[in-house]
Image: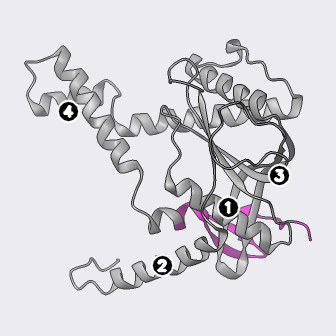
Amino acid sequence: MSLPELTLTDDAKYYLYEGNELERVTAIVSDALPPYLAPWAEGVGQRAMHEIMLENPEYDLATAKRAIANNGLTCENEKIKGQDRGQALHQAIEAMILTENLTVDPKDFEDPEHAKYARSFAAFLADYRPQFEMAEVRVCYPELGYAGTFDAVAKVIARPKGARGPDVTGKRIILDWKTNVSKKTYESHLYQLAAYQLAMERWDDPVEGAAVVAIGPMGDVKGKPYTFKVNHVEPEAFRAMITWRQVLKDQKAKNPLGRTPK
């Protein structure tokens, strides 16, 4: 059975399958799990405040906050940087996959920081030598009301010395890349993979596992510039997450002090 044809609504908030709106995997996961970006946002704020106050110890709190905004040090600024980086990296990675060229020319990137991440991904390709079968894969589970996109299906044919975690060498697996300055994988990423695995099973195209490739900036992180995290969350756990998310919604609706939607 072939995978379904999916499109996005005009506002890109939902996927469309046979005229029906399906929720994004990322939306379901973010509703059901504690926000992993909260600690990140707190860290951004603390670093920005430290930087401003170090340079301007005479500032009061209000003045420091204005300086943080004026210098582009807010969480929103960091989110925009991350989005730009993600888009640039996905384009570079697609080119690497299509051309099988593992070299990275910094001149190909307007932002030299983006080249650092592309070089890190090239290191992953050299270490694990994945053989790609599909890229930018859209899947859905209509009966459960969700859909999503992951980066690739591939067979990993190598394993670098010192690699930790389950060995997936020779297995056909889902791969999904994430970029961040600390090359971290979050719990939400693993539940996303579980959703994609469950959907692949729904379309009679099961995989033998899944992994997140968390890419950091080459030269700015210790050790390898990426982490390869094999998913330990079982696909059926995402089905349970959908149920739990609905429980949360139902209980929140019963809150007598909650705001009534307009």
Residue 94: assigned label: none
Quadrant location of the C terminus in the rendered image: bottom left
Q: Badge 4, how many Cα within 10 Å: few under 14, some, many 20+?
A: some
- Front position among marks 1 and 4: 1
In terms of depth relative to the viewer, which is nearer, 39 or 259? 39
Q: Badge 3, how many Cα within 10 Å: few under 14, some, many 20+?
A: some
Say which residue label 1 marks.
148
- Front position among marks 2 and 3: 3
Q: Report x, y in % for residue 56.
A: 15, 16
Residue furthest front as drawn: 162
Q: Report x, y in % for residue 94.
A: 78, 36
Disc 1 residue type (three-letter): Gly
Which of marks 4 and 2 precedes in the sequence?
A: 4
Say which residue label 3 marks.
171
Residue 244: assigned label: 2
Residue drawn at x 34%, y 80% as measured from the top left? 252
